[in-house]
Every structure is written in C-alpha cells, then in structure tokens.
Image: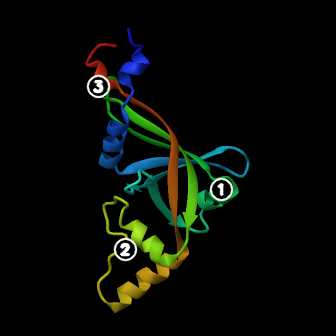
Amino acid sequence: MPSRRELIQMRPEEIRQYLEGQRRIIVVTNGPDGMPHPVPMNYGLDAEGCIIVTAFRKSQKIVNLERDPRASLLVESGETYHELKSVIVYAHAQILCDPDTVMEKMRLIRSSESLTIAEGTDAQAQVRASMAKRAIVLFTPYKYVSWDHAKLGLRY
C-alpha cells in the first residue's frame, strides 16, 4: 500500500504543468546574517524548466545570490486542506546582467503588466535604461518536493 506522501506527490509532468499555471513564487535566499530571506516574485519558465525572475542588481536577493547561489523556491495554491497544492524547488542561481539578455528573458515572466514593451522613442529609451539596472536570475532546479491534496479526494 503506497504511503499518503506517495499518493499526493506530483509527477514531473504535473509539476511542470502546475508551475506553468501559476504566476507568483516565493524566492528564499540565504541572507547576510544566515537567516532566510523570503520574497514574493513574479516568475516564468524557459523551455528547459529553469525558473526566471528579475530584480534590480543592487537588491538584497541579488547580493545574497552572489554570495551563495543556492535558493529554495515555493509555489502554493488552494484555500482548503483538500485543495492544497505546492511545489518546493531547490535550485542553483545564475545571475545574468547583459541588457539584451535581461530584456529577452523578461518576456518569459508572467505578470499583470508588460515589463518590456514601450511605445514611442522616449518610452523605449526609458525601458532600455531600466534594463541596465536589472538582472535576470535563472534558477536551475536540482530537486523538487511536491504535494497535491486533491489527489486524496475528501479522504484524509
């Protein structure tokens, strides 16, 4: 008889589908004092399954990742116990600063507002200047922990 943990665990294709359907992720880096530094971020996925976020180069999360590229990421949803779904991703971070790369990768991030499209020459120049201050963090997952309580139905 499988354990309840095995029953609620998501398969790799379910994890990918779940991550593709969500917008916000909690990025947890190791802070300067050793304490976890969690922040909510909009994110996207690339074709290889890497998780992409953007941040200003001087932000605390970038400073933390420059010092220690390990991170834990959390996506969760559901209001009641039997609706709970979550994926924890353990990943290594790569920081990309080239403005063209930043703009290209930012297009993959799901957000309620456009992060890179601007109309008019002045607006485009402003976006270009902003890209020079930003970085892309490419998280390469090496381990997933997941659960989908809906797989149990209403049986606990």
Q: Position of residue 115 (x, y in %)?
A: 37, 70
In the drawing, what numbered circle is on residue 150?
Answer: 3
Q: How many marks?
A: 3
Tell me the residue at 32%/80% (across/down).
118
In the picture shown, does residue 73 fall above or below 97?
A: above
- Residue at the far left: name it: 153
Q: Tell me the element at label 3.
A: helix
Q: Earlier in the sequence, mark 2 or mark 1?
A: 1
Q: Which of the two residues, 42 or 10, is positioned nearer the viewer here? A: 10
Q: Label 3 vs label 1: CA separation?
A: 36 Å
Residue on which disc 1 sits: 64
Q: Helix, strand, or loop for circle 1?
A: helix
Q: Secondary structure at mark 2?
A: loop
Which amino acid, mark 1? Asn
- Real-space Cα separation, disc 3 to disc 2, in angstroms: 37 Å
Question: Given the current orientation, which residue lies at the most extreme front position?
Answer: 48
Report whether 80 appears left or right of 139. Answer: left
The amino acid marked with disc number 2 is Thr
Residue at the extreme top: 1
Say which of 36 and 145 sits in front: 145
Q: Position of residue 56 (x, y in %)?
A: 54, 68
Instruction: State the CA–CA distance, disc 2 to disc 1.
Output: 25 Å
Query: In the figure, 85 relative to 133: above or below?
Result: above
